[in-house]
Amino acid sequence: MVETKKSFCRFCHVFCGIEVDVDVDQQRVLAVRGDRDNPFSQGYTCIKGRAVPEEIHHPERLLSCQKRVDGGWTGIGSGQALNEIAAKLLAIRDRHGPRAIAAYVAGGAGFAAAGVPLSKAWLTAVGSTGFYTSFTNDCPGYVIAAHRFFGTAATPLGLYAGVFDMAHADVAMFIGANPVVSHRPCMPQSNTDKQLRDAQKRGMKLIVVDPRRTEMARRADLHLQVKPGEDATLLAGMIKTIIERKLYDQAYVEQYVSGLAALHAAVRDFDLEYVARRTLVPADLVAEGAVLFATAKSGAVRDGAGVTMARHQNLNLQLVYTLNALCGRIDRKGGLLYNPGVFSPPFPDNAAPVELPLFGESTARVRGLRGMYLSPGHMEMPTTTIADEILEPGENRIRALLVHGGNPVATFPDQDKTVRALQALDLLVVVDPFMTATAKLAHYVIPTKHFLERPDTTTILDATFPFPFGQYTPAVVRGPGDLLEEWEIGWELAQRMGLPLNIPGLSMERKPTSDEVLAAFAGFGRVPLDEVRKYPSGHVFGDLVVGAVLPHAIAHPDKKMAAGHPEVIAELREVRAEPLIDGGGYEQGETFSHRLIAIRMDEVYNSKGQNLPSLQKKHRFNPAYMNPQDLQNLGVSDGQHVVIDSGRGRIRAIVEGNAGVMSGVVAMAHAWGGELGSPTGRLIPDDERYDPLTGMALLSAIPVNVQAA
Ligand SMILES: Nc1nc2c(c(=O)[nH]1)N[C@H]1C(S)=C(S)[C@@H](COP(=O)(O)OP(=O)(O)OC[C@H]3O[C@@H](n4cnc5c(=O)[nH]c(N)nc54)[C@H](O)[C@@H]3O)O[C@H]1N2
Ligand SMILES: Nc1nc2c(c(=O)[nH]1)N[C@H]1C(S)=C(S)[C@@H](COP(=O)(O)OP(=O)(O)OC[C@H]3O[C@@H](n4cnc5c(=O)[nH]c(N)nc54)[C@H](O)[C@@H]3O)O[C@H]1N2
Ligand code: SF4
Ligand SMILES: [Mo]
């Protein structure tokens, strides 16, 4: 018998509403399609979501825990695996102390409401601060920029400075973000293409800043094809134009923004001829972009990986916040708004924000890096230091690592070092449904239930939806064997190690049900979980709020957003003092031919999806997209190999000509390699060209030389 059940997709961070056809006798998922009754995604799914039946019933999906014995794998029960792991962890802690145990928790665990918090709570109970996530390998610059600009990273607007109220915007500018493919949060994230088209039909102007003429750039009113890594210069030029032509919102700035004079002094030298020579965007287009953005009645700039991963990433984000603030777009209709959420605790009227130190008390043993606070009580250590923290001898060396829903071999910089480090561990436990490149190095691999096999809520994305939206889903099918859910990893390890978890509403006396765990995490919200459960397709519980956070939610004593923060001014001057270099290099004497930029592919999510047949139809590898003229100069054509060399690593890649990629640029997705594709992580060192505050590696706009293979 076939039944159709409502749920939401958790293949990626978007959570589109889905209808799932299930053969209830066989407990098989037959098809997944968009749920038109879901008010958030309105029937939209992408090709990855529709491929979920292939993922859940994949022949290579692990259906039992795997233990490495004599170089091979033996299937064991999950209870047995956890017993053995807990005993080993206790022994390591007794011998070497709690910091010898660390956890890297990433996307695979992150899309379950209680996955990350339970693993974090377990590690805290262990007594270790060695908590790492993909965030510090992706966009830690937000924490720095928010701290400088708002005075706290715990702003009620969140690190993205609010949700884009695009439905009421007259202009949208995307810099280094490609939400049509990536569905980046707060942009808005589901059905982005249609929402953009609808807004454009209504008259909204679209500006895209990207070294590639992406599909979105092609239908933009203005495409600024910037040289990768030069965004700070471009933004400085736009800000200079807006200040000097007095196009900013003077009343708003007077009331809510400080440091305008210092900012102006720092951008004064970015005259548009200089900006054009450096960014390769013609001066008149830089001015046109500034005028178009500033003179619209409402709108926002949204940023993405192109600026959070390239050079001057903290400054880039600060300048994006600044551009929004100068034009009066934060906390204003059609701009960036506060989403009170559904499962989040409400931010009371006129409340002061939570003060939050930037750095935590815990330090890395390398490069002088420190833990950062993302929110109160939540500190993360820089992920780019994990490999060294394992390899460096001495006290507090990491000896046991839990990798929960992540794939370090595919996604960390310096792949060789990452592999060496993982091999040097006394205990590597990988929680993953597949035998990934990382899992292959583990002592234990613990597969978990598929997302359609567990109940869940939209709690983790609460404040990123385009309106306060909430959904609960029951499990759609039963999971096979004795597989655990994401939250059970932390709970079971804590229980076996005799450690209490500090989570209000959860006791260690009796194992809670999944629904009880979900209720505990929803318990502080504006809307009770039982209310949310009444709506199988999810529900919108009110609107985004205009005028909710300014000025009281700014933590600076003057209650103003700091556009002239001294560290920002200093970095702007540094940028201005940098030499103008032709080609890919940054420094005098560097002779790199290209810059390699990070892009996302439609058909995969980082390393996920590469093994699904319908997604493999598009590509079985990650092409190196290059301008056809560049390919001709190299004497190679589509499908042929090039060698890409960063000076620190080299990879072979298969080229594909694309006239939309600007000359001098190689565009590639990451997380490929092994049997399929080219691992760009091999080109990227973790100890050179990294951000000195966050340790973030240079993941985009990387100087490289390209040659025919
Ligand atoms: N389909 C799919 N979706 C994904 C993912 C995936 O792998 N596949 N990954 C997810 C993850 S983990 C993340 S963090 C998000 C990222 O989501 P986004 O932030 O939207 O990132 P991208 O889609 O890579 O778009 C970044 C754009 O920046 C451009 N770019 C690169 N370097 C520069 C630069 O120096 N300057 C400027 N101005 N632009 C530059 C690229 O050409 C690209 O078009 O996507 C998420 N969504
Ligand atoms: N060179 C380079 N490196 C990069 C980037 C780049 O652009 N260039 N981007 C960076 C960014 S933005 C990010 S976010 C990181 C991503 O880094 P990671 O999050 O480490 O990478 P993913 O490939 O998303 O890993 C997800 C893992 O979760 C597993 N998984 C899938 N479903 C489940 C589940 O239900 N439960 C569990 N437990 N696991 C599951 C998948 O099999 C996969 O192994 O990579 C970063 N690295
Ligand atoms: S964008 Fe695609 S993969 Fe992500 S939640 Fe929606 S349907 Fe699933
Ligand atoms: Mo990411």
Image: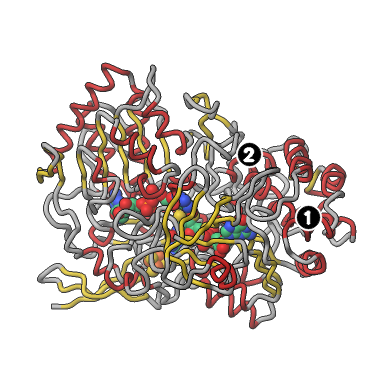
Q: Residues within 10 Å of mark 1 (few under 14, many from 20)?
A: many
- Residue wearing tag 1: 326
- Give the vertical position of 546 relative to 498 (above or below): below
Q: Residue furthest right?
A: 245
Amino acid type of the residue tagged 2 in the rendering:
Thr
SS at badge 1 = helix
Task: Residue 644: give x, y in percent of width and height.
Answer: 48, 55
SS at badge 2 = loop
In this orientation, which residue lies closer to the viewer: 571 or 664?
A: 664
Task: Please state if 474 lies on the left or on the right of 368 as rendered.
Answer: left
In this orientation, which residue lies closer to the viewer: 451 or 107?
A: 107
In this orientation, which residue lies closer to the viewer: 549 or 222?
A: 222
Q: Residues within 10 Å of mark 2 (few under 14, many from 20)?
A: many
Task: Residue 658: give x, y in percent of width and height.
Answer: 54, 73
Task: Please state if 19 lies on the left or on the right of 29 as rendered.
Answer: right
- Residue wearing tag 2: 152
Amino acid type of the residue tagged 1 in the rendering:
Leu
Task: Please state if 67 lies on the left or on the right of 566 as rendered.
Answer: left
Q: Residue at x 43, y 47 (%)?
A: 682
Res. 141 in view: yes
Q: Residue at x 45, y 49 (%)?
A: 650
- Label 2 and label 1: CA atoms lie apart by 19 Å
Upstream in sequence: badge 2 or badge 1: 2
